[in-house]
Image (tube, helix red, strand yellow):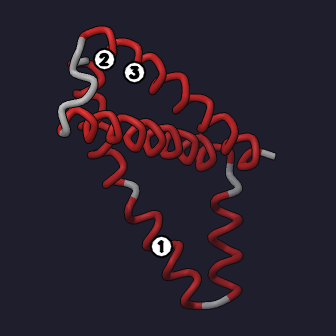
Amino acid sequence: TSILSIAHRITGFCLSLSIPIYLIWLICLFFGDVSYSRFVIICSNLWVKIIFIFIIYGFSYHMLNGFRHVLWDFGYGLSIKFSTISAILIIIFSSIITILISIKLIF
């Protein structure tokens, strides 16, 4: 549980580093079709898509692990057995979510 808790903090920090991407996207939307189409062309690059896949995994992991932390805050699931099972499920489900969204992103 400590490794996933540390990973939760790391993904939260890394997701905050992705905020400029969202701001650039909004600015391109504000300035119209030409700037937005340039943004889409840049985002079509393979390396940018790989970065987006990491962002998607970080977001899905952080969200699912956040739900687990909320349950802990209310006093549920504090046993070692529940913590272990929920940790495994979080890793599996965040991977599945990432794959499902990334398939649409890549193709």
CA–CA distance in space, label 1 to label 2: 39 Å
The residue under label 1 is 24
Instruction: Name the amino acid type tagged 2.
Output: Ser
Q: Residue at x 43, y 40 (%)?
A: 58
| Label 1 residue SS | helix
Q: Residue at x 24, y 37 (%)?
A: 9
Instruction: Name the amino acid type tagged 1.
Output: Ile
The answer to the question of whether label 3 and label 2 lie on touching residues, with beta carbons closer than 8 A, is yes
CA–CA distance in space, label 1 to label 3: 36 Å
* Mark 1 surroundings: few (<14), some (14-19) or many (≥20) residues within 10 A: few
| Label 3 residue SS | helix
Counting residues from the N terminus, which is met first, the one under dot 1 or under dot 2? 1
Q: Residue at x 26, y 41 (%)?
A: 70
Percent coordinates x, y for residue 84 in the rendering: 34, 12
- Is residue 1 rendered to the left or right of residue 23? left
CA–CA distance in space, label 3 to label 2: 5 Å
Using the image, tell me which numbered label, if any, was put on residue 83.
Answer: 2
Between 105 and 4, the one lying in front of the other is 4
* Mark 3 surroundings: few (<14), some (14-19) or many (≥20) residues within 10 A: some
Q: Outermost residue, top direction?
A: 81
Between 70 and 105, the one lying in front of the other is 70
The residue under label 3 is 86
In the rendered view, tell whether residue 62 sits above or below residue 25.
above
Mark 1, mark 2: which one is toward the viewer? 2
Percent coordinates x, y for residue 104 in the rendering: 75, 48
Mark 1, mark 3: which one is toward the viewer? 3
* Mark 2 surroundings: few (<14), some (14-19) or many (≥20) residues within 10 A: some
Instruction: Name the amino acid type tagged 3.
Output: Ser
Q: Quadrant of the N terminus?
A: top left
